[in-house]
Each structure stands twice: as C-alpha cells, then as structure tokens.
Amino acid sequence: MKRLLIIFLSLSLIFAIGCSRKNNVNRDDISVLVFVTGFIAGSPTYEQMVEGANEFKEENPNVNIKIYEAGMNQAEWEQQLAQMLSEGVFDFVISSNPSLPEICSGLANLFPDVKFIITDAQYEGNAQIKTYHFAQDEQSLFLGYLAGLVTTSNMPYANAQKKIGFIAAQEYPLLTNQMVPAFLEGARLADPGIELDFRVIGNWRDANKAAELANAMMSAGVDVFTAIAGGAAQGLLRTAAERNAYVVWYNIDAYNSAPGAIVGCGMLEQKKLVKEILENLKAGEMQYGICEVLGVREGYINFIFDNPSYQNLPQDIRAKFETFMHSMVN
C-alpha cells in the first residue's frame, strides 16, 4: 500500500509539472542528480564519485549537479529518489550500487524523460538505464595473490599458519559469489595451502565490532587482512597497527591510513569514470540499455605502485607481484 501511494503521488506531481519539463535537453545545460545510496564520508566509492562530479562541475559551470545522500536504509531509497525526480529538475541520475537498477527500472516508467547511469552494477535491456560493472573479481584476485605472498613470506609479522582474513560489513551477491572466492583463489596461486577466515560485522559503521573480529582472527592465526566494510574498517586498521598484522586494501590509496600495516592498495577508478560519464552526457553520446564491464585491461581497476610505502615490501615479493600484474593487464 505504501508503495502504491508513493507511485500515485509521484504520478500526480509529474502531471503537475509535465508542461514545464524540458523535452530536448540542452547539452551545455544538463541537470544531474548524484544519488548516494549511503553516506559519502568513509566510503571510497562515494567519495570518488562525488569528487569526480564536483570537479566536472567546476570545469563546466553551466552543468547543474546536486549531491544527495540517501542514507543506509535501502527500503527508503525508491521513495527518496521518486521525490527528488518529482521536482522535474533532473535530466540524469548517476549512482553506484548493485541494487539501484531494479529501483530505477520501476521509476523509469514514471519519469520517461530521465536517464539513469549506475556504476558498480549489472543490468541490461532498459532504454533509460546504462550500467557499468567493475570487475571486482580481478581486484580481489591480485590483492589475494599479494596477501598470499606476504603470509608465506619471512616478513617480521608473518607467521607460519598460512591464514589470511576477510572482514565484510554485510554479505551481498557480488561480494559472496565473486570477491571473496577470487581473493582466496589469488592467495592460493601463491601457495595452495592458504586458508581464508571470513567474518561479517553486520553493518557498515561499527568499528569496534570490526576491531573485535580482527583481534579474534589474529588470535586464530591470521596475519594478513582485507576488508569491505566502509567506515567500520577503521577498527581493523587500528587493530592491525596495534598488534602488528598486514593489510591489503580495496579501491583507494590508503597506505597513509596505517603506515607499515597496509602493504598494498588496489584502485577503483570511480572518479575517472564519473567524469567520463558526465562528459558523455554533456556531449549526448551515452548509449543506454547495456552494461559495460570495466577491469584491469580497460584501465579502471589498478594497483597503487607509486606510493613509497609499497617499497617497504621485500624486493622478491614486489618482483613476483609485478610480474603477476603484468600478466593480468596483458
């Protein structure tokens, strides 16, 4: 009943403003809603997305860009997005979440003049929706391989147990079906005997719970960690620094967040992609109804080699890892 009421109200607003909405978009004066499904602070994905949008806005002052934080309650996202679009202001919505295509598909019929561009998602067949899927299994594979090299090394804090750890805020299909298995697969390319300790916090904010899990995992023999946990991952970093464990990190250059503990960082080029999307929207060159897959070969998933902290790894580990990365690119 609540969903029907939302749709009815949205339709009413559409009819009220329908005559004033632009039918032919002036590409020098596009209006874009950047819809953040969560909070910007503490989320590398959204920080990059917003940074890219703001930089594009500075370079293109005629473009209207509004940043909206929708919070963590997924049940409210559809209503919030419908309310924003009911203003009749926005030509495009840019967001980044695997759950968004289904929500946008439901809203597309209500807002036929709006186009939806969603990164970190897979969806095809709707003429109003374009998605980009980051090949996160590739990032997991090379970070897992590096973790495997470290846990089997003679580095000061590596033990003899061949056990690595993965802490997640919550389970979702991409994480469970691709990222975690690929992380272990990568590690076992370094040594088939490596085991993975996988644990779930239950939310994206509880740094104390992440620290509690990390402590328990270290007591069980884990000496190299990774995490997909938003702000909660700060608890892992604190524990790793205090108790001398190693960490490999997803999506951003985080070496300076825990010097000495973080030994490798992947990079998800979300900022680069968002700026390219906005440029294509402005030029009217976006193709809808399809999903583009972006990975290492395409240049949207990388590893941060040029931070001085990377040089703290032993030369033999760096040589093996760089050979591995070169093979992935090719």
Image (cartoon, rainbow, N blue to C red):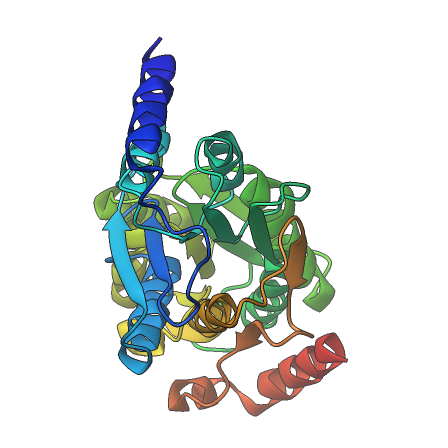
| Foreground pick, 20 / 47 | 20
Extreme residue toward the top, this view = 1
Q: Locate residue 319, reporting x and y percent.
A: 64, 88
Name the residue: 32% across, 82% down: 59
Q: Locate residue 131, reporting x and y percent.
A: 58, 52
- Placement of the N terminus among the 4 image quadrants: top left
| Foreground pick, 31 / 232 | 31
Image quadrant where residue 4 sits: top left
Q: Locate residue 181, reporting x and y percent.
A: 65, 48
Name the residue: 23% across, 58% down: 41
- Placement of the C terminus among the 4 image quadrants: bottom right
**Is residue 180 found left or right of 222 in the rendered image?**
right
Image quadrant where residue 2 sits: top left
In this view, 164 is above or below 245: above
In this view, 296 is above or below 127: below
Image quadrant where residue 50 sits: bottom left
Q: Is residue 258 visible?
A: no
Total labels: the figure holds 0
**Is residue 127 found left or right of 120 in the rendered image?**
right
**Is residue 81 found left or right of 298 in the rendered image?**
left
Name the residue: 26% across, 41% down: 87
| Foreground pick, 132 / 47 | 132
Name the residue: 73% across, 58% down: 192
Q: Is residue 17 visible?
A: yes
In this view, 274 is above or below 108: below
Q: Locate residue 129, reporting x and y percent.
A: 56, 47
